[in-house]
Image (tube, coloured by chain):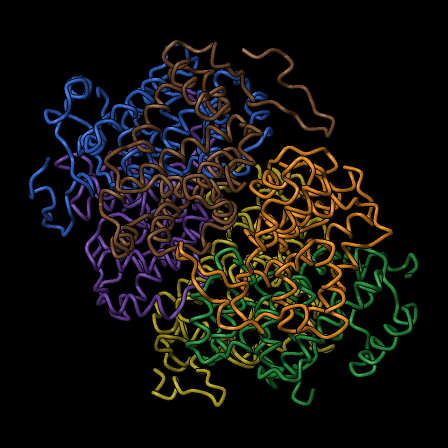
Chain colours: A green, B orange, C brown, D blue, E purple, F yellow
Amino acid sequence: MRGPTHNRHTVAGMVDAISRFPVREPHELPDDLRERVGAIADRSGFAPNVFLALGHRPRELRAFLDYHDAVMEREDSSLTKAERELVVVATSGANSCTYCVVAHGAILRIRARDPRIADRVATNPWTVELSDRQRAIVDLALALAVEPATFSETDLEDARDAGLTDDEIWDVGAITALFALSNRIAHLTALRPNDEFYLMGRLPRD
Amino acid sequence: MRGPTHNRHTVAGMVDAISRFPVREPHELPDDLRERVGAIADRSGFAPNVFLALGHRPRELRAFLDYHDAVMEREDSSLTKAERELVVVATSGANSCTYCVVAHGAILRIRARDPRIADRVATNPWTVELSDRQRAIVDLALALAVEPATFSETDLEDARDAGLTDDEIWDVGAITALFALSNRIAHLTALRPNDEFYLMGRLPRD
Amino acid sequence: MRGPTHNRHTVAGMVDAISRFPVREPHELPDDLRERVGAIADRSGFAPNVFLALGHRPRELRAFLDYHDAVMEREDSSLTKAERELVVVATSGANSCTYCVVAHGAILRIRARDPRIADRVATNPWTVELSDRQRAIVDLALALAVEPATFSETDLEDARDAGLTDDEIWDVGAITALFALSNRIAHLTALRPNDEFYLMGRLPRD
Amino acid sequence: MRGPTHNRHTVAGMVDAISRFPVREPHELPDDLRERVGAIADRSGFAPNVFLALGHRPRELRAFLDYHDAVMEREDSSLTKAERELVVVATSGANSCTYCVVAHGAILRIRARDPRIADRVATNPWTVELSDRQRAIVDLALALAVEPATFSETDLEDARDAGLTDDEIWDVGAITALFALSNRIAHLTALRPNDEFYLMGRLPRD
Amino acid sequence: MRGPTHNRHTVAGMVDAISRFPVREPHELPDDLRERVGAIADRSGFAPNVFLALGHRPRELRAFLDYHDAVMEREDSSLTKAERELVVVATSGANSCTYCVVAHGAILRIRARDPRIADRVATNPWTVELSDRQRAIVDLALALAVEPATFSETDLEDARDAGLTDDEIWDVGAITALFALSNRIAHLTALRPNDEFYLMGRLPRD
Amino acid sequence: MRGPTHNRHTVAGMVDAISRFPVREPHELPDDLRERVGAIADRSGFAPNVFLALGHRPRELRAFLDYHDAVMEREDSSLTKAERELVVVATSGANSCTYCVVAHGAILRIRARDPRIADRVATNPWTVELSDRQRAIVDLALALAVEPATFSETDLEDARDAGLTDDEIWDVGAITALFALSNRIAHLTALRPNDEFYLMGRLPRD
């Protein structure tokens, strides 16, 4: 686990801790997780902090990665990868989850090849201008994320009217549900976004 | 998957479908899942509907079971099993999640050996009379479940002041996060509680 | 009035007081009230705690019983008794009123001859599956109970479109209003449901 | 009951109906109610519309009058009459109930001998400048009126710390509960305040 | 600036300060502002307290007056002056802003030549009976005032369907925006309405 | 004013209009405004869209610029320019105002010389890690921006306890009030942020 330096204060009076709880560097993880997180770190150039923070509980990290891959990497899905990130950024914006907005905002910019979409979606997912299909995806996700108690058949009908299939509706719902979990882990741990995410996908050739 | 009968209406005009989406009976699941769900069904006397509904997506069911076991069956946890169910029932009550309230209400009654606790906690988790430790657990869980955006260091301090360790705080937070996911899957699918749950733990010798 | 024992703590750390304020047993009430509450106790096998708690102020108990009978026992009403209890359980669920949910949930189970309806309605009155007429009744009641400031002609039109007569609309509204009062008396006094209510109407022959 | 004229539109395009439902003039009421409402009309110079609207259901009007007198006219109460009206105006303002704000605002001005207090309390009961005792009364009433689900021992402790007795706390709570009912009857019926109320208590000698 | 007397308490225990911050009497203002505020005071018979309070910061008072005149005195506007005040009173009522409700309520009564409209609009802007055009104006204003995050094209379409031109929509929006500012200055300063406003426009010949 | 091209759709199905209403390019503005907006455009390298959108109503643009300069450029203020932008970004984030978050986020990054602060503050102003003084500024601003009805002496006391002077409290309040207006103008017009803002202040030498 991290030494005492991970709680030092910056000049500006802010703490630069990754998490409120102890974290584990990738090399401190069990073999299978070290390999999975290592592969992600190789691709991104850095290990996203969510894996270091959840590494505190390897079994939970493993289940999280499995759930994540099951919904975010599902090959049969007819949602594009950009659409899946749209769900993540919209619901994380509605939940004011800084880690998820900053990290998945970066991925959304890259997937959608649009350097401005993430800031617009995260700041106001309710009225951001989107295509009709994107709007239907975001409306469905927001209904389930923010007011689950009143989620009803009407929400499904609206989604179907906009052309979403039941398989796509499940995908949107399952991603929303996973990030309801993920947002809360980030809030619990005061999870800090890696500095690298802030700029990813903003420059022409990113 | 279930045949067309799963959408028939009852005399009272109500639908008795288990889920808005196709479901799988345990014997239709991949081997490992059939075995896990089968073991649960053997213990309970019936297969809880959440497994039939999530069986529609075996990979997601597997990750859900893994996450569930990692937090709800964690052996090192100093939360009692009743305390873990208290977190589930309190947050599911706050989220108006019928499946989770009815199913985990049954488990809470059994774990706490109290036939009335679940109805009291689910109906009003904010003011239900509890011991100081239970109240601290429920307050922490509600803060994270219902208003994650304003979850702050103060919530942790209150929990610590009530004697919760950081390990217990993570446990409460992780269970809350998992059921934020679980509640939303139940709302997405309009998941129907098995009839058996309603009465479990209510009779003297249950 | 009850002696000091009514505030003793149970082994589990919980208080078993009926009310935050002094209560009166039926035999301590003025004659007319003793008779009315006695008749109820004879029918139910026990005196519901709300009468002991309101017995602290006999004049208010008398007016409460009169209002209750005027709307809940009204003979000309074309609402069934189960429909009236549906209004009570739905609005008390929305108000997180433990006494009213537990006590009237029991009555609803009996009136509707359905051992599961009360838990479903109380946990999520907004989306519980109901017949069209029941849904219209519950929607009207929730609008008036929870957001009275925006209750409008539209709510009445929706009710009429679903076939409710103006006489039925008044009945739903008047029951909702009475339990807006009743819920608040229960919250004020931290009114404890009688143990008997929890199980009533749950068993086949109840 | 009123003839067809009671729905005529005014020049400004507004309806001048007293209620969405049929009303009864005092002379159309049963004897005991005619007498009670008549006595009020004699004192005020006019029959307040709430009695005409509730006169549609004499039994409910009778119970309402009884409950009203039990809490608003209670002789043993150590709340002043102005303090009781303060509870009514504050909670009715929080509930945006036009009839109750206008009618009881008039009574509050008269009881408190202050021509401006009602507008200030009704517009912003949360921050209006009041004496410490008045503030404690209003805070208690607002907690119970607006967020009954989270009403707790803390609210009682705050009231006691400000010097309110338990008897006064019950009075405040019971008045709040009665007007939770009354506000909803007014919203249900779109109850129109009598023109006379608007100016009462505003002029030096009123 | 005002001397220490401006914080003295009244007999009733209330403070009669105009503002939480120092105020300036008209004669203490820079020449141009003294002239403008003086002209208003001459017309009204008194200097409205908002000018004394904002006089603490003459440059802000000047910009406020300019913005106010640009939207409230705009000569090309096809909104009547009564309609503009309707926007102010409705949004200030929704914001529980005592100064604006009392002061602009007086102006609305005079502009609309209706002694009761202000109390009705301020107490419940959501359901107060209005003409279709007035209702469209108030709905547009409330949407922007209270829930700006979800203000959308739909709100504009509803306004256009009710016959409002785009020029009128801007007027309603701009007045709403200005009083979002104005309400917050009043809340910041605990701005006290002049006694004169309470009665203005209530008497036949006012 | 802009020709018909200002409503054309982009390939991605999105509209690239600056405003829902006609806009004016700087050279179409009255002389004094052309000069003021021109000076800003010279400094920034582009004319911020808010000026083109408000240019539709030159008199309102002039008052807006005056109010803006009075509070944002006030020389006597002991709030730093970064602190003033902190107020803007925090309250605009809470109001989900895309234009203000993107445009003033850029300015905040530059003023605070911190490429990440704006995303963190805008995404979650309630819990973002800040110095004690910054936290007090943001808490005061959020209380007034989001829940003005309950803004009270307690909010001022908290600010004073954190060391803010009354002059600074007014500054924070006045900036909050101005951007309550500004946010609503942006929501009314669906104001589009200039592309340039998204990247400003994010690169080392920006």
Asked if residue F138 shows in the view, the reply is no
Q: Closest to the observer: B162 or A175?
A: A175
Q: Closest to the observer: C183 or A28?
A: C183
Tell me if residue E187 comes above or below residue D118 in the rendering. Answer: below
Tell me if residue A53 comes above or below residue E111 in the rendering. Answer: below
Q: Residue at x 63, y 41 (%)?
A: B118
Asked if residue C110 shows in the view, the reply is yes
Q: Closest to the observer: E143 or F139?
A: E143
Residue D77: % across, % down:
42, 13
> Is residue F203 toward the left or the right of residue A61 in the image?
left
Q: Residue at x 23, y 38 (%)?
A: D191
Q: Residue furthest front?
A: C205
> Is residue A104 toward the left or the right of residue A41 in the image?
left
Tell me if residue B145 comes above or below residue D93 in the rendering. Answer: below
Residue C182: % across, % down:
43, 31
Tell me if residue A58 comes above or below residue D177 in the rendering. Answer: below
- On the rendered image, what quadrant is the N terminus of chain B found in? bottom right
Q: Closest to the observer: D159 or A140?
A: A140
Residue E14: % across, % down:
44, 25
Q: How many marks?
A: 0
Residue E203 quadrant: top left
Residue E66: % across, % down:
36, 58
